[in-house]
Amino acid sequence: MNLTDIRNSKFLKQVSTLLTGTLLAQIIGFSIYPFITRIYSTSEIGEFAYFNRWVFLVAAIATLRYEIALPLPKKDKDGFSLYRLSILLSWIVLALVAVVLFFSSIDHEINAFSLIWGLCLLFGIYGISRTNLGVSWSIRKAWFKLISIQQVTAAFVSNGLKLILGLFSFGAIGLIIGSAIGFLTGGLFYLRSYLGLRKEYISESESHDLLEQAKIYKQFPMFNFPHVLLDFGIDVLVAILIVANFGKGTFGSFSHAYLILKLPLGLIGMSMGQVFQNRCVELINSDQKILPLVKKSMFTLFLLCLLPFGVLFFFGGDLFAFVFGENWRFSGELAQIMSPFLAINFIVSPLSSLPQIVGKQRPMLFLGVLMALWQVAVFGGLSANSLMSDLSFNAVLMIHTIGMICILGITFC
């Protein structure tokens, strides 16, 4: 493998198509964020980040992870049956969340903030679950241009609203509304393509087909669902612990550092991961080896991660203070601590779909349980003045790294 082979590959051309949209979406978000951090306080951004973690948790489990299986069936008819099944499950989850919100409102005093928070939660869950389904089907059909357009549209709507509402002093609720409408925009973007699929396949997709596909891909709710529940559930629990020990302002700094460190992942890693999944399924269905593609992907991402994560590791505090304002220097110092872990996470990010593709979800779930228990133990023991220096905080990051590497090893055993 050499650089010439990478430049001329079909894989890289598809990545470039996705990367164009992803790049524009990230540019929109990043160009507005220095204004966001000067309009909103660390506490308001902490409240917003707390809301987002709940949205992503429920949205990730709304379809029992059947949407991940959409690219796998050889026939489009079977893939569409999984699509319909996932939508049905997401409506059930949305109804349950609405019931929980209703009964919780009976025991607590309702105010404008809590009402808007609950409605935005429902809109966000719907939007993200529909977006995930649309993206998975687009990966199946190699509609990477469609994914790119959706990313730009959602980013423009979401970030524009956050900025406008911030200028009118909406506070945290402005961030939440902007985020929820952005999620909803992304989900509705794929509605047209889904309605077209219904016309084409609805006569071929009967109720018994949904049950048949649910049984064929039962490993996704059995193993991937508990794993993602652990991952996002721990994110919410960590948010609760940091807010309890340090306050929403510190959590805002922490979540902002994590967001900026994940920019390369969202910019490049996600695009490569979506193309990687499509190419892996093609190779497996044609009885070809996927190891060369794995090596090519990791080598490319290794080269791409050196500059951004290196700069953040050495100059995180000063860089954050210059770009986002002096109030965010502490966030930059946290970014310096987290950058080694997220650099490795970036390198292996496209490979996270391999356990599902090659049927190694059981060991992946086992590793997920171990990492979840470790995080609970470490973050639960943090004291109110040790977030920066506590060695256990670094241990949390390193255990994630070790876990990701172990997953890759198990995949090819």
Image (tube, rainbow, N blue to C red):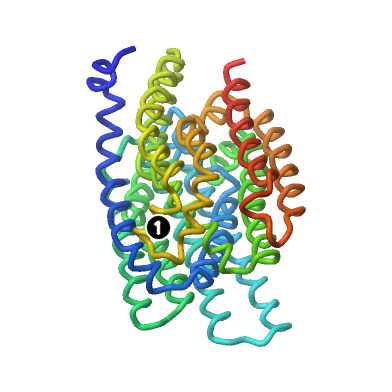
Q: Which residue is mark 1?
A: 187
Return the residue nearer the eye: 230 or 361.
230
Position of 323 relative to 353 (above/below): below
Return the residue nearer the eye: 179 or 62.
179
Q: Is residue 250 left or right of residue 381?
A: left
- Residue drawn at (60%, 20%) of the image: 409
Check disc 1 and report its element: helix, strand or loop.
Answer: helix
- Say what amino acid the circle numbered 1 marks: Gly
Return the residue nearer the eye: 123 or 412.
412
Determine if residue 218 is in view: no
- Residue drawn at (63%, 46%) of the image: 231
Q: Position of residue 201 (x, y in %)?
A: 39, 43
Q: Position of residue 30 (x, y in %)?
A: 33, 56
Q: Quadrant of residue 18?
A: top left
Q: Quadrant of residue 12?
A: top left
Position of 277 relative to 241 (above/below): above
Determine if residue 263 is in view: yes
Q: Position of residue 330 (x, y in %)?
A: 51, 58
Which quadrant is home to the N terminus? top left
Return the residue nearer the eye: 223 or 298.
298
Q: Residues within 10 Å of mark 1 (few under 14, many from 20)?
A: many
Position of 166 relative to 272 (above/below): below
- Residue drawn at (39%, 29%) of the image: 301
- Residue drawn at (47%, 72%) of the image: 41
Q: Position of residue 171 (x, y in %)?
A: 45, 78
